[in-house]
Image: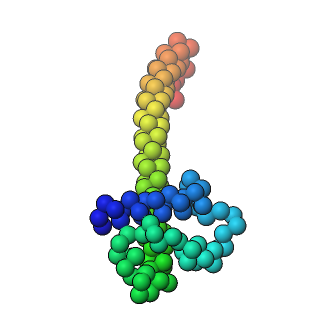
Amino acid sequence: MDVLASSALQRALNRDRDRHGDDGAPSRSDSLFGDEDLAHAMSIDLDDAPSDVRELAMRDPKRAKRILANRLSAARSKERKTRYVKGLEKKRSELEECERALIVERERMVTAMATLAAENSALQMMLGTPAR
């Protein structure tokens, strides 16, 4: 895709993001079945569309709008996937940090348990009762 086409697609994506909000999710008023998305796709301004879509619009405007809408949808999907993967990576690092803290805590408890067991044995010996 040439630079002009990608910048036009980015402008269209930004307009679509304004419609949906920052997270790219459809607003509450959007239909679950995509009726409003289809209506939105049909109202997409082809002036900002990439040149290949503009050429197609001369022959088949509905198909050109659908192609542009699909590209916008794919771009939104890619952004959502990127955010999702970054969220998973952040969660993984948080869990790894938690694991390290738990390992240190476990080692401290094992040491404390060994110390208490030794102290218990010493006290048992002082009392003259057999250790368990």
Q: Is residue 82 above or below residue 90?
A: below
Using the image as rendered, state which of residue 18 and residue 76 is in the foreground: 18
For the N terminus, give its image quadrant. bottom left
Q: Residue at x 57, y 74 (%)?
A: 43
Q: Quadrant of residue 17?
A: bottom right
Q: Residue at x 42, y 83 (%)?
A: 58
Q: Is residue 87 above or below residue 67?
A: above
Residue that extends furthest to the right in the rendered view of this protein: 29
Q: Position of residue 33 (x, y in %)?
A: 63, 78
Residue that extends furthest to the left in the rendered view of this protein: 2
Q: Would residue 77 be visible to someone looking at this image?
A: no
Q: Position of residue 46 (x, y in %)?
A: 47, 72
Q: Quadrant of residue 7?
A: bottom left
Residue that extends furthest to the top in the rendered view of this protein: 126
Q: Identify the colour scheme used.
A: rainbow
Q: Residue at x 38, y 69 (%)?
A: 50
Using the image as rendered, state which of residue 40 and residue 106 is in the foreground: 40
Q: Is residue 42 left or right of residue 67?
A: right
Using the image as rendered, state which of residue 23 and residue 132 is in the foreground: 23
Number of dots carrying numbers: 0
Using the image as rendered, state which of residue 98 and residue 91 is in the foreground: 91
Q: Is residue 9 above or below residue 125?
A: below
Q: Position of residue 76 (x, y in %)?
A: 48, 63
Q: Would residue 55 be visible to someone looking at this image?
A: yes
Q: Is residue 15 left or right of residue 99?
A: right
Q: Residue at x 43, y 30 (%)?
A: 104
